[in-house]
Amino acid sequence: MITVAGRSSAGPELAISVTGLTKRFGNRTVVDDFDMDVPRGTIYGFLGPNGSGKTTTIRMMCGLLTPDGGGGTCLGFDIRSQSQQIKERVGYMTQRFSLYEDLTIRENLDFIARMYGVRGRRARVDRALEELGLADRARQLAGTLSGGWKQRLSLAACMIHDPELLLLDEPTAGVDPKARRDFWEQIRRLVDGGITALVSTHYMDEAVQCDFIAYIAYGRKLIAGKAREIPRRIGLAMWRVEGENLGALAEELRACPGIDQVARFGSVLHVVGTDAAALDAVAERFARRGPQTWTRDEPGLEDAFIHLMAGAQDNFADRIAS
Amino acid sequence: MSWFSPRRFMAVLAKEFIQMRRDRVTFAMMIGVPLMQLLLFGYAINTDPKHLPTLVEMGDESPVARAVLMGMKTSDYFDFQGIVTSAAEGDRALRDGRANFVVVIPPGFQRDMVRGRRPSILLSVDASDPTAAGGPVAALGGIVDAALKSALDGPLQYAAPEPPPFDYVVHLQFNPEGRTSTYIVPGLLAVILSMTMVMITAVAIVRESERGTIETLISSPVRPIEVMVGKIMPYVLVGYIQTIVFLTAAGLLFQVPFTGSALAFFIGFNLFVITNLALGFLISTVARSQMQAMQISFFTILPTILLSGFMFPFAGMPGWAQTLGTAIPATHFLRLVRKVMLKGAMVQDTLQDMAAITVIMFVITAIAIARYRQTLD
Ligand SMILES: Nc1ncnc2c1ncn2[C@@H]1O[C@H](COP(=O)(O)OP(=O)(O)O)[C@@H](O)[C@H]1O
Ligand SMILES: [Mg+2]
């Protein structure tokens, strides 16, 4: 749990505060006893592999799905009984493109603006088109846009009623790296302007863009907190290894006691363990042997998540076995 | 916060119109299907054939006998193709299909008639296709009466008492519902409206979930009733266009009359269309894909065709089938339309049918709204 300086309960400082959220489809528990506190004015990263329950959780938070257990508030409104108020104040960008492909860009924006009762609609739609850089293509059918443009249009659509909270479900999936970078810059600008963004993603490298992070796997929250603090909180020690023959070395290291995880990032090997002393001993032995160079380093978010995933799998296996 | 926002309703309505306009194929189908059906049922599937080959066995050449034959000829049902000289020859012609009918005027027909002996005209019918025979046979009585009346206007007038001074014998029972294109066309309107209205609404709504746009709708503040009404209204308009096209074509091509109250038709029509659209909406809450929506819609069409009285006379169906048929909206609309178009019915004559449709409409709408989910559960 996060504690925001000086406050610990759900007040106006928390855009989202839910506890014990549970959702079952049939007899499968897809989201299990999930807690989350999202402080206002931050980017909150919601990470987890595919099928871990991110979309389901977001849908419960904005009233699209009814939780089977738990509850909480979104912008101070109860997620079970006040979904109408929540819907009016939240911009929800769905994982799959969900605007009308057979309407033009302008017609889509105009339709959404009318649904939300936006004042000065024409001017607002014009401005959105202008900001999007789509003013000259406003008459093009939305279905003919490329993936990156569809994503930008979706974002513009869910911003059109100037929501206080953005729920963005895998907004960068299937989008090229340049568009991804632009997207994160835009989110940062918006958040600096005062709104809150909950962004789900399964790209671990996007975690660094977030102020806070919650990590979910198999419907259970594994950890949540300030992005910077997460690796340290898990208590990992890490060595970077560079040099020749990393493949063979990795095989050898995996069999070593004291080493929990060996992951390769391009031309670098991250060797990670929870017992720092044991890890250091092994590392120094290998470093003396060479020919690779070993450096002690701070573990990153990705190391932390790989570690969490491995643990979650074990837990999950235990749960199934029992 | 109100339970119904005209602004959001208008937004849905406008969007639906744009989408309809872009989907030219569907729109063309909605206008094309009724016309095609009308032509098929009106011309090709003709249960009331005319100009059927007919032979005559003339036992009497008198003016009265000639008048009877002339009357049959001008009715267009009978096409006289020649004379037979014996009963055996007539039977042979019927058997080998050279003729559908043989008319036998007995010897001394006029003389016997004048003497009040009630002679018989015999109509032998090829009964292998009862539908083909039904129309002419049913029409025969009127034709002969009319012919005689004019023939006896002259010097023989004293011999024309009521009832007609002769019998005609038909060697076949005939179809009491006496189907003609005039009769089938109004019923066809009920079937076509059921088919297109139900299917098109169901598909249009399921398309929202299939394409994922339902998530945009549900995550916005729009309410189910606004979506439902906003999506249905454009198709009411389509129903209007279909009906205007259909009635115009029916009048021009088949001279189907419209003798009753236009207001009765209008009220019944609107009730019926809304009922079908609500049914389409209900189907859309069950179907998971456009394909399924289409299949379920087709599934509802079958009882509409079979049990509504369109195909088979309602009164002739067994009790259980009538009970089922009563629950079908088309049954009542079909009665209303036939009454109004063919029998000159006024509003007060059709109140019962309107009431029945209204009840069905409320039941279907209630179930549809109850089933419509404002969430994705
Ligand atoms: N409507 C549904 N019915 C049944 N199972 C579902 C439904 N929606 C999601 N699931 C299942 O729940 C799990 C979590 O899905 P989801 O929340 O979409 O995960 P994520 O967004 O993290 O990829 C998946 O295994 C998915 O198959
Ligand atoms: Mg998802």
Image (cartoon, rainbow, N blue to C red):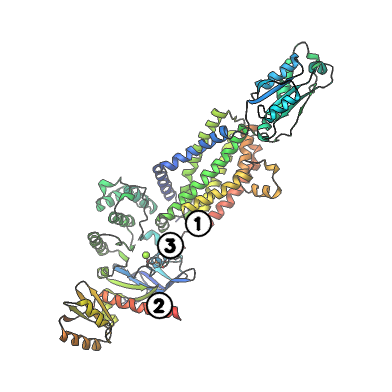
Label 2: state its secondary structure.
helix
**Chain at numbered mark 3:** A
Rendered-image quadrant of the N terminus of chain A: bottom left
Q: Position of residue A273 (x, y in %)?
A: 26, 83
Q: How many neighbours does mark 2 have within 10 angstroms: few (below 14), some (14-19), or many (20 or more)?
A: some
- Report if residue B35 is visible in the image: yes
Residue linked to disc 1: B372
Q: Position of residue A64 (x, y in %)?
A: 43, 62
The amino acid sitting under disc 1 is Tyr
Q: How many marks?
A: 3
Q: Nearer the viewer, mark 2 or mark 3?
A: 2
For the residue marked with disc 3, what is the amino acid? Leu
What residue is shown at x 28% (from left), y 54% (from top)? A149
Comparing B306 with B53, the one in front is B53
**Residue identifier under label 3:** A64
Question: Is ligand 1 closer than 8 angstroms to the Cβ of mark 1?
Answer: no
* Residue sitting at x 44%, y 78%: A320
- Please state if B97 lies on the left or on the right of A272 as rendered: right
Q: CA distance from mark 2 to mark 3?
A: 27 Å
Q: CA distance from mark 1 to mark 3?
A: 13 Å
**Are tags 2 and 3 found on a single chain?**
yes
Circle 2 residue: A316
